[in-house]
Image: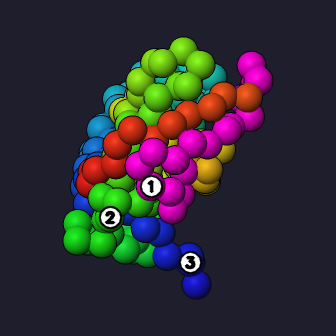
């Protein structure tokens, strides 16, 4: 049996949309492109377009299977379960780098939802793990490639 995965509502919806996009690619777009590539005739093993499309089809199939399993075993975190007084999954955290006074805001999410472009860090990341369960005003020290970084929690809110 697969392990349950905690997801925020937003994360669940994004994964569901990604599944729909990949299913469209896998079941509609790629088969049509494969049909067109076959029409060029000749040995399909030497048809670079056909070979590339078969690889893309295999990759998309693996991603669809993984997303289906993830969504089947997902448990959406209810908004009322996200605390605003303590860092946990689904919370937004405002951090201050104690040395530079730079501010950063992160949302803590499950490893399945990590998206650094959206400032969503995993609860299993060094920063995320150090923050779990702490409240406003607390300080953490995290080992980074450039050395230790000290952060102060300035704010916590629901995602």
- Mark 2 or mark 1, earlier in chain: 2
Element type where label 1 sits in the image: loop
The image shows residue 27 at horizontal and vertical percentages of 32, 50
Alpha carbons under labels 3 and 2: distance apart? 27 Å
| Dot in front, 2 or 1 | 1
Which quadrant is home to the N terminus?
bottom right
Residue extending furthest toward the front: 137
Residue 159 seen in the current view: yes
The boundaries of the magenta stretch are 131-147
Q: Nearer the viewer, residue 49 or 70?
A: 70
Q: Which residue is mark 3?
A: 2
Q: Nearer the viewer, residue 156 or 62?
A: 156
Alpha carbons under labels 1 and 3: distance apart? 33 Å
Packing grade of label 2 (10 A; few <14, some 14-19, many >=20) is some
Element type where label 2 sits in the image: loop
Residue at point 23% right, 71% down? Answer: 80
Q: Is residue 122 magenta?
A: no
Residue at point 50% right, 57% down? Answer: 134
Q: Which residue is mark 1?
A: 135
Q: Which residue is mark 2?
A: 83
108 sits left or right of 10 in the view = right
Tag count: 3
Question: For residue 6, which quarter of the picture?
Answer: bottom left
The image shows residue 52 at horizontal and vertical percentages of 54, 28
């Amino acid at each position: 049996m697969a392990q349950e995965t905690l997801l925020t509502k937003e994360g669940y919806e994004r994964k569901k949309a990604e599944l729909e996009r990949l299913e469209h690619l896998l079941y509609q777009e790629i088969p049509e492109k494969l049909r067109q590539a076959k029409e060029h005739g000749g040995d399909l093993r030497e048809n670079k377009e056909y070979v590339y499309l078969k690889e893309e089809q295999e990759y998309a199939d693996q991603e669809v299977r993984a997303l289906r399993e993830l969504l089947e075993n997902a448990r959406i975190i209810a908004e009322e379960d996200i605390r605003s007084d303590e860092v946990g999954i689904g919370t937004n955290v405002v951090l201050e780098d104690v040395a530079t006074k730079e501010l950063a805001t992160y949302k803590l999410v499950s490893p399945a939802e990590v998206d650094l472009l959206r400032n969503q860090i995993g609860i299993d990341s060094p920063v995320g793990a150090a923050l779990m369960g702490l409240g406003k005003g607390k300080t953490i020290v995290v080992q980074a490639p450039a050395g230790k970084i000290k952060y102060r929690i300035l704010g916590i809110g629901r995602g």
